Image (cartoon, grey):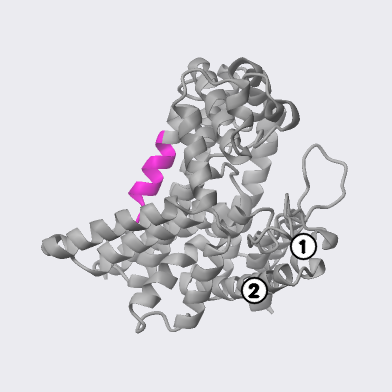
């Protein structure tokens, strides 16, 4: 029974675009209810709950710093409380879920790959449904899923998620294993070569620039790990040329080229006009507008930010000051609450100090060598590292798609490797 419950608990992370019709001050996602029920179940079922003193100390320290940011910079307590509760519930749920697996990441990741298989199979059904114009098989909004701007006429896979990039974020932690399996079929018995190809194919069919970059980084990282190019100048030259060729091919994909050109055009234009804004794509506008807002807000609150959860207020206050009147500005408030980027949101809400803590964490606890530690934990760590980089650029939500859980897994993978090295 425990195996079934914890599998469903893990699965619930990836249904966070299902909402309950409850009149609250924030969107109450269906999986929040599951989180709370699982926390209660765990507390009643497991009498001994171990949490290290070091973890408690770090959490208390971060809470104090967050509160100081709110107090000193005149932040909004209701917004702080909302984010604090959201992160706290996700953190408790994630930790208890890992504990229910007895922190056995190999067992947990086998369940995670079962979930990815479900996602991939549905994505294949979605692809077929799009090709034959069968709306009920492609668009699950009739079941209560928020699927954003999904259009059956647009051949972009997004599974049951809110947009294609969300499907990408769900797949990224598995990419390292998939790429490694293709290069070396003798590793990882729980994932087949065919399954690995399926995962990469689904990611490619999202036509997400974030997904393509994540795949490119993964391939390069795996290649540099598996083959010692630095001792073979010719091989290193071939790898460099191949990487440049892949980047050129990536750039020449229409959606990617549009976003890159639009982004360069806005960010390097010293005098952005209404016409400049309205001629660009919405994704680029979301990133640019939030960048300009954070740039302005950070002048006032550079060190500790304006307080956890406060970016929405920064957005409303600074938007008119930094973005010229335009149709996009009038009709869209894109990423008003999450800043479109984890780096931008951290600077906006927690300041340079918050960004510094995040960077210290991801570089301090990355498993850097497959030789010194188990290859399995190396792939876990570096897959999540690429997830961190991807979300740092284009996803600012603190808790969506199990992000808190992956932060914890990243830490425990490092600890397991260190413990194994000591034995």
The numbered dot on residue 139 is 1
Which residue appears at 66% of the width and 17% of the height? 320
- Residue 349 image-quadrant placement: top right
Mark 1 is surrounded, within 10 Å at the Cα level, by few (under 14), some (14 to 19) or many (20 or more) other residues, namely: many
Q: Give the range drawn in magenta.
A: 356-366
Viewer-proximal residue among 89 and 423: 89
Q: Can residue 221 be seen in this view?
A: yes
Q: Quadrant of the N terminus?
A: bottom right
Viewer-proximal residue among 97 and 182: 182
Residue 379 place in picture, x, y as percent: 38, 66
In what element is the residue under mark 1?
A: loop
User: Of the residues under marks 2 and 1, which one precedes in the sequence?
Assistant: 2
Which residue appears at 40% of the width and 70% of the height? 179
Mark count: 2
In what element is the residue under mark 2?
A: helix
Which residue appears at 48% of the width and 62% of the height? 173
Q: Is residue 410 above or below residue 338?
A: below
Quote the CA–CA distance across marks 2 and 1: 13 Å
The numbered dot on residue 124 is 2
Which residue appears at 78% of the width and 63% of the height? 140
């Amino acid at each position: 029974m425990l195996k079934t419950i914890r599998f469903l608990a893990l699965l619930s992370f990836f249904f966070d675009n299902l909402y309950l019709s409850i009149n609250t001050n924030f969107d109450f996602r269906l999986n929040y209810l599951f989180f709370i029920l699982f926390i209660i179940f765990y507390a009643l079922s497991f009498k001994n709950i171990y949490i290290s003193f070091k973890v408690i100390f770090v959490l208390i320290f971060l809470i104090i710093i967050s509160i100081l940011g709110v107090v000193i910079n005149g932040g909004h307590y209701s917004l702080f409380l909302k984010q604090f509760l959201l992160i706290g519930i996700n953190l408790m749920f994630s930790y208890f879920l890992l504990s229910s697996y007895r922190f056995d990441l190999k067992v947990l990741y086998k369940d995670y790959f079962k979930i990815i298989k479900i996602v991939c199979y549905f994505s294949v059904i979605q692809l077929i449904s799009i090709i034959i114009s069968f709306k009920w098989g492609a668009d699950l909004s009739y079941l209560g899923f928020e699927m954003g701007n999904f259009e059956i006429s647009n051949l972009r896979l997004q599974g049951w998620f809110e947009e294609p990039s969300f499907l990408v974020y769900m797949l990224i932690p598995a990419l390292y294993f998939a790429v490694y399996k293709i290069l070396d079929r003798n590793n990882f018995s729980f994932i087949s070569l065919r399954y690995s190809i399926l995962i990469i194919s689904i990611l490619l069919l999202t036509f997400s620039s974030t997904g393509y970059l994540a795949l490119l980084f993964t391939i390069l990282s795996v290649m540099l790990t598996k083959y010692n190019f630095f001792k073979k100048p010719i091989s290193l030259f071939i790898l460099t040329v191949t990487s440049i060729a892949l980047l050129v091919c990536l750039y020449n994909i229409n959606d990617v080229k549009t976003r890159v050109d639009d982004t360069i055009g806005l960010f390097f234009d010293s005098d952005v006009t209404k016409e400049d804004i309205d001629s660009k794509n919405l994704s680029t506008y979301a990133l640019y507008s939030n960048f300009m807002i954070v740039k302005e807000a950070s002048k006032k609150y550079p060190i500790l930010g304006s307080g956890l959860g406060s970016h929405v207020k920064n957005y409303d206050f600074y938007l008119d000051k930094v973005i010229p009147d335009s149709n996009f500005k009038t009709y869209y408030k894109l990423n008003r609450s999450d800043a479109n980027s984890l780096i931008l949101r951290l600077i906006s809400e927690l300041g340079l100090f918050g960004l510094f803590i995040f960077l210290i964490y991801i570089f301090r606890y990355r498993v850097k060598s497959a030789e010194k530690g188990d290859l399995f934990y190396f792939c876990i760590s570096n897959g999540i590292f690429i997830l961190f980089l991807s979300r740092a650029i284009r996803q600012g939500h603190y808790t969506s798609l199990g992000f808190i859980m992956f932060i914890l897994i990243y830490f425990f993978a490092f600890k397991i490797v260190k413990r194994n090295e000591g034995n």
